[in-house]
Image (spheres, rainbow, N blue to C red):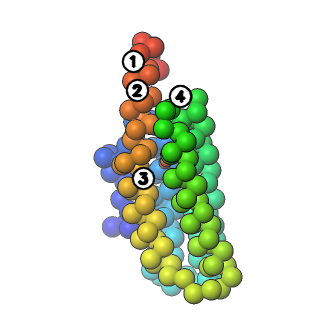
């Protein structure tokens, strides 16, 4: 069983976002797996870098989508993304500088954060998009 299992309850109802969240789950699992098998620091660093990079890409994409859809809580949502980006980047820097960090704690923190953020905040994006589609009466 993977560290993080994708489940339909995580779907926000927007395919592009769901696909990106699935990929984030996969990268988190890859990172956790790398930890579990005792991968060398260098490769662990690569798995972590891939995760941090993709998180930033995903946040930018999600924010662009909220912006296009006039999502009312964009500013608040963006602040939460910024906080996580900062925390993830700080962690990555400590890691590459060889300072003591708990990679397992980070994997647990990240998975909790990811799952909670999807359930609590990202789902609202899907709800907003669905209701604006219904208001417009269009097929999309
Ligand atoms: Fe988000
Ligand atoms: Fe998201």
Q: Which mark is residue 56?
A: none
The reply to whether discs 2 and 3 touch (Cβ–Cβ < 8 Å) is no
Compare residues 140 and 70 and report the one nearer the observer: 70
Q: Secondary structure at mark 1?
A: helix
Instruction: Decide: is 37 above or below 127.
Output: below
Q: Position of residue 19 (x, y in %)?
A: 48, 45
* Residue labelled with disc 3: 117
The reply to whether discs 2 and 1 touch (Cβ–Cβ < 8 Å) is yes
Q: Position of residue 81 (x, y in %)?
A: 54, 52
* Residue labelled with disc 1: 134
* Residue labelled with disc 2: 130
Distance between the alpha carbons at the discs numbered 4 and 1: 13 Å
Distance between the alpha carbons at the discs numbered 3 and 4: 19 Å
Q: Position of residue 59 (x, y in %)?
A: 57, 48
Q: Position of residue 34 (x, y in %)?
A: 51, 76
Instruction: Decide: is 73 above or below 4.
Output: above
* Residue labelled with disc 4: 69
Instruction: Assess disc 4: are there few (<14), some (14-19) or many (≥20) residues with their C-alpha within 10 Å of its C-alpha.
Output: some
Distance between the alpha carbons at the discs numbered 4 and 2: 10 Å
Distance between the alpha carbons at the discs numbered 3 and 1: 25 Å
Q: Residue shown at 54%/60% (left/top)?
A: 84
Q: Secondary structure at mark 2?
A: helix
On the rendered structure, is 6 left or right of 95? left
Which callout, 4 or 2, points to the residue nearer the camera?
A: 4
Look at the image and tell me whether residue 56 can be seen.
yes
């Amino acid at each position: 069983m993977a560290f993080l299992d994708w489940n339909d309850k995580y779907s926000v109802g927007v395919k592009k976002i769901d696909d990106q969240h699935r990929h984030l789950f996969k990268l988190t699992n890859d990172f956790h797996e790398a930890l579990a098998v005792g991968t060398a620091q260098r490769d662990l660093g690569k798995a972590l870098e891939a995760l941090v990079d993709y998180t930033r890409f995903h946040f930018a994409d999600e924010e662009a989508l909220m912006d296009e859809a006039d999502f009312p809580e964009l500013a608040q949502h963006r602040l939460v993304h910024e906080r996580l980006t900062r925390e993830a980047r700080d962690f990555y820097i400590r890691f590459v500088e060889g300072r003591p960090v708990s990679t397992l704690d980070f994997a647990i923190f990240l998975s909790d954060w990811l799952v909670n953020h999807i359930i609590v905040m990202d789902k609202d994006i899907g709800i907003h998009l669905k209701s604006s589609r219904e208001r417009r009466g269009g097929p999309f």
